[in-house]
Amino acid sequence: MVSLKWRDAALQLVFHLVLLVLERFLISVVQLYLPLPHLTFFPSTPSFGERPPSQPRQVRTPKSFSGEPTTFKVWVYSVELALRANTFSSRDEELDFISSFLDGNALLWFLSCVERGTVFDCWTGLKNALAETFRPIEEDEEFRLSLFSLTQSGSLEDYMTEFTRLSLHVPDLDEHSRALLFTKGLSFELRTEAMREHPINMTGAIRAARTARRNVSVLHHSRATQMRMPVRGNR
C-alpha cells in the first residue's frame, strides 16, 4: 500500500512538471512567431516612485466674448487655461485660436485691427488691447466701491460668491488687504470670531470664517439646550 501511494505521488509530480514544461514551450513559440512588444503575458506594475504616464488635461472650451465688459475677466481666465493646455507652433496659430472665441463687437473690433495692419506680438498684447477697449475705467471703480461696501446679509456661501465675483474686477488689491476686507464684511458674530485668527490671505480668511460659523453654531446650540432644561426649585 505504501509503495502504491509513493508511485501515485511521483506520477502526479511528473504530470505537473510536464505541464509546466509544455506551458513554457507554448509561450516561447507564441513570442517567436507573434512578436508583439506592446503585449505582455503578465501585467507589469510601476515600481516604487515611478509615476504612471500622464493623461492629457481636459479643459473646458472658452465661451465667446462679444464685448460685454462684465464677462471680460472670466473670459480671459478661461482662455488662459485653454492656452496652457494646448501647444502652438507659432504666434499666428495661437492668435488664430484666441480669435476663434471672439464674437459680436469684439470680433468686429479684431477684424478692424487686422485690416489696419495692427500686429499683436502675443496673447498679452491682444489681452491688453481688448481690456482698453471693452473694460471701462468707470465700471472698474463701480466694482471697487461695491466690493468695499459689501457685507454679509445671508449665508456665508452667498457672501463668498459675491465677494469673489467683485474682487475679480479689482486685480490691484493685494492678498492681505483682500483678506482683511473679506473678514470686515462678515456678520458681527462671524467677524468677531474670525478676527481672532488674524488671517493674512484669502485662504486663511475663508478658513477662519468657516471655523467661526462652526463655533457660533455650537454656542447657539448650547444656549438653546440650557434654556430647555427644567429649573429645579428649592426644597
Image: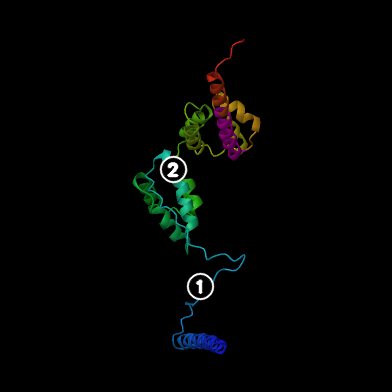
Name the image quarter holding residue 206.
top right
Relative placement, left or right, of 63 versus 125 is left
Instruction: Look at label 1 and name its amino acid.
Output: Pro
- Picture colour scheme: rainbow
**Residue 72 - label:** 2
For the residue pair 44 and 145, the one nearer the viewer reads as 44
**Residues under labels 2 and 1: Cα distance?**
50 Å
For disc 2, the neighbor class at 10 Å (few under 14, some 14 to 19, many from 20) is some
For disc 1, the neighbor class at 10 Å (few under 14, some 14 to 19, many from 20) is few
Name the image quarter holding residue 221.
top right
- Percent x, y for residue 233? 59, 11
The residue pinned by badge 1 equals: 43
Residue at the left extreme, as displayed: 104
Q: Are marks 2 and 1 in contact (CB under 8 Å)?
A: no
Relative placement, left or right, of 154 versus 184 is left
For the residue pair 184 and 40, the one nearer the viewer reads as 40
Query: At numbered mark 1, what does the secondary structure look like: helix, strand or loop?
Result: loop
Pointer 2 or 1: first along the chain? 1
Query: At numbered mark 2, what does the secondary structure look like: helix, strand or loop?
Result: helix
Look at the image and tell me whether residue 15 can be seen.
yes
Q: Is 221 a magenta residue?
A: no
Residues drawn in magenta? 201-217
- Percent x, y for residue 2? 57, 87
- Magenta region, mostly helix, strand or loop? helix
Look at the image and tell me whether residue 185 can be seen.
no
- Percent x, y for residue 154? 47, 28
Instruction: Look at label 2 and name its amino acid.
Output: Phe
Relative placement, left or right, of 199 versus 115 is right
- Percent x, y for residue 28? 49, 87
